[in-house]
Image (cartoon, grey):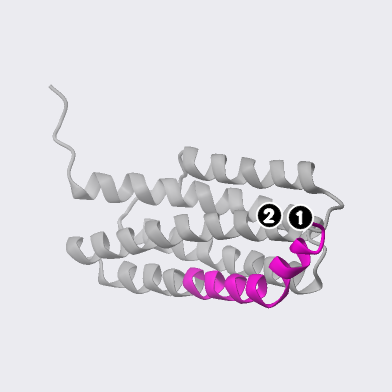
Amino acid sequence: MAAEKGLETLFHDTLKDIYFAEKKILKTLPKMAKAAQSAELKAAFEKHCGETEGQIERLEQVFEIIGKPARGKTCAAIVGITDEGAEIISEYKGTLAIDAGLLAAAQAVEHYEISRYGTLSAWAKQLGYKEAVTLLQATLAEESATDKALTQIAKATINQYAMAAE
């Protein structure tokens, strides 16, 4: 009979999942920045690339807090979302709509991360990892700010620009 899996195991598994996701995102952001036509969107992707490096470091600190090695496990969700982003790049390259597509893909990533960090933060609190809660909430705040910034870029210019092609 397999040992009962509890919140501690679930927390660790989800931590490995988001660690993999952040590393995958770090590899994907420069490709998105390169594909973006808008200077503002390029800059947003480049800024988030730097933030993602810091988020990976924070996750490594959380692994240390729980006494586990910093290791990822394949996250099918982020693989799917980043594959969609790659598809947008190949299908919309050179069109007025590419930036709107890239923005949508980036926000799908952000929303996934927001849900993961919110959950991990709640679980860390439940498990008594006060220092981990602080680290996870710092990342959650960054992800939320990035999502808001992307929404502003979309509303201010990108969506209208994409419509000009119709």
Dot 2 amino acid type: Gly
Residue 137 visible (yes or no)? yes
- In this rendered view, identify the residue nearer to me: 131 or 84: 84
Magenta span: 143-166
- Coordinates of residue 121 in the picture (x, y in percent): 31, 65
- Coordinates of residue 30 in the picture (x, y in percent): 74, 57
Q: Give the distance between the C-alpha atoms of the residues marked 2 and 1, in whole angstroms.
A: 5 Å
- Identify residue for label 1: 98
Which quadrant would the N terminus be assigned to in this image?
Answer: top left
Residue 74 visible (yes or no)? no
Question: What residue is at 51 percent from the left and 65 percent from the top?
Answer: 55
Dot 1 amino acid type: Ile
111 w.r.t. 78: above or below: below
- Coordinates of residue 62 in the picture (x, y in percent): 38, 61
Drawn side of residue 122 relative to residue 78, left or right? left
- Identify residue for label 2: 101
